[in-house]
């Protein structure tokens, strides 16, 4: 890999070298490196672009890295990755996509990740999206995540767009069986004339299922963000969602909550707040020697952690 590709890999997956355990690194539309283990297999699809990640029942304390990097201007791809996680597992999955576009054509990555999580399994999923480059071509990214949680399984998602993406549609949906739980923390930073839409949807179909969704966004300059959070309570379940956003300059943020209960024992809560950076926060940091811009950036970093 060249220096640009290595930097992208560090930004989206915090990798300076090949990781320990199972991994598949995709670079400019091709598999650049792959490793499997006795418990985790990675198989190339034969009918379309993408891979199957098969995690055997009982796999504990193991990780899978599947980052994607694009440094070729004009490259457009659609990739399907399916995760089959057996029963009684405890694994961490690190994904993410970085695009560097210094050319005149748009570069685009669309990824569909489907998770089938077995009973009593725990999955942590981390996905970062990042863009850079001085070319006129746009950096486009449309991640779709589809999740099916079996009985008493748990999944925690940390998904973020950390800058540099011109246009994105981020769609995440989950269906929960009895006793299953999901935690989603989604973060978006936009600036310039960038546009981002996030759709987060959870169906709780089994008794005792729970969800907690938190969306945080910062819209700077003339950028636009739209967040739609939807929870369906179809059983005796508990769901919470919160949308917390900072608006700056001429940015626009639209937050739409949708709660639907079809069971008398469904308990659903939604909170939403949009506002500017508090003046007292800026003043406190500026009295410590920071400029106004430095103070703003520190507050934003803390907000999006």
Image: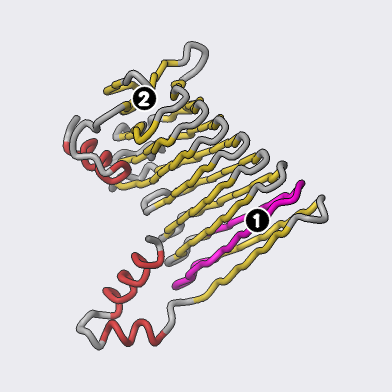
- Say how the picture is coloured: secondary structure
Picture quadrant of residue 265: bottom right
In reply to whether residue 249 is colored magenta, the answer given is yes
Label drawn at residue 192: none
Q: Where's residue 36, x and y in %?
A: 32, 20
Q: Is residue 155 magenta?
A: no
Sequence-earlier tag: 1 or 2:
2
Residue 154 rendering spot, x and y as whole percentages: 53, 42
Label 2: how many residues lie within 10 Å, few (<14), some (14-19) or many (20+)?
some
Mark 2: secondary structure: loop
From where the camera sits, is residue 50 visible?
A: no
Is the N terminus in the top left, top right, bottom left or bottom right quadrant? top left
* Vertical arrangement, residue 246 with respect to residue 288, above or below: above
Q: Is residue 196 above or below residue 274?
A: above
* Position in image of residue 150 (x %, y %): 61, 34
- Report the front residue among 199 and 64: 64
Label of residue 239 in the image: 1
Residue in view at x 33 percent, y 87 percent: 283
- Could you say whether the residue bearing mark 1 is in a helix, strand or loop? strand
Q: Residue at x 37, y 38 (%)?
A: 94
Q: Is residue 181 or residue 145 the one in the foreground?
A: 181
Q: Magenta part of the protein: which range?
A: 225-252
Q: Residues within 10 Å of mark 1 (few under 14, many from 20)?
A: many
Q: Is residue 4 above or below residue 87?
A: below
Residue plotted at (61% across, 62% down):
255
In the picture of the structure, the residue carrying the numbered disc 2 is 29
Relative depth, front residue between 74 and 128: 128
Q: Position of residue 208 (x, y in %)?
A: 67, 48
Identify the residue shown where x is 41% and y is 38%.
106
* Overall secondary structure of the magenta section: strand
């Amino acid at each position: 890999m060249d220096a640009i590709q290595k930097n992208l890999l560090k930004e989206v997956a915090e990798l300076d070298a090949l990781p320990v355990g199972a991994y598949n690194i995709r670079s400019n539309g091709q598999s650049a490196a792959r490793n499997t283990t006795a418990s985790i297999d990675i198989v190339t699809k034969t009918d379309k672009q993408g891979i199957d990640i098969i995690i055997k029942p009982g796999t504990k304390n193991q990780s899978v890295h599947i980052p994607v990097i694009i440094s070729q201007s004009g490259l457009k791809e659609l990739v399907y990755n399916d995760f089959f996680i057996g029963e009684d597992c405890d694994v961490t999955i690190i994904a993410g996509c970085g695009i560097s576009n210094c050319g005149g054509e748009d570069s685009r990555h669309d990824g569909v990740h489907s998770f089938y999580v077995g009973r009593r399994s725990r999955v942590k999923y981390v996905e970062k999206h990042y863009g850079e480059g001085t070319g006129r071509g746009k950096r486009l990214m449309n991640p779709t995540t589809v999740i099916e949680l079996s009985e008493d399984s748990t999944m925690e998602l940390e998904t973020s767009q950390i800058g540099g993406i011109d246009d994105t549609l981020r769609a995440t949906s989950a269906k929960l069986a009895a006793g299953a739980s999901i935690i989603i923390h989604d973060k978006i930073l936009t600036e310039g004339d960038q546009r981002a839409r996030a759709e987060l949807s959870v169906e709780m179909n089994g008794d005792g299922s729970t969800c907690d969704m938190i969306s945080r966004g910062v819209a700077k300059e003339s950028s636009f963000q739209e967040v739609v959070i939807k929870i369906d309570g179809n059983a005796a379940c508990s769901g919470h969602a919160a949308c917390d956003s900072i608006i700056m300059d001429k940015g626009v943020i639209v937050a739409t909550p949708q709660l639907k209960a079809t069971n008398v024992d469904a308990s659903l809560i939604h909170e939403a707040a949009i506002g500017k950076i508090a003046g007292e926060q800026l003043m406190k940091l500026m009295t410590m020697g920071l400029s106004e811009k430095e103070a703003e950036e520190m507050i934003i970093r803390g907000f999006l952690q």
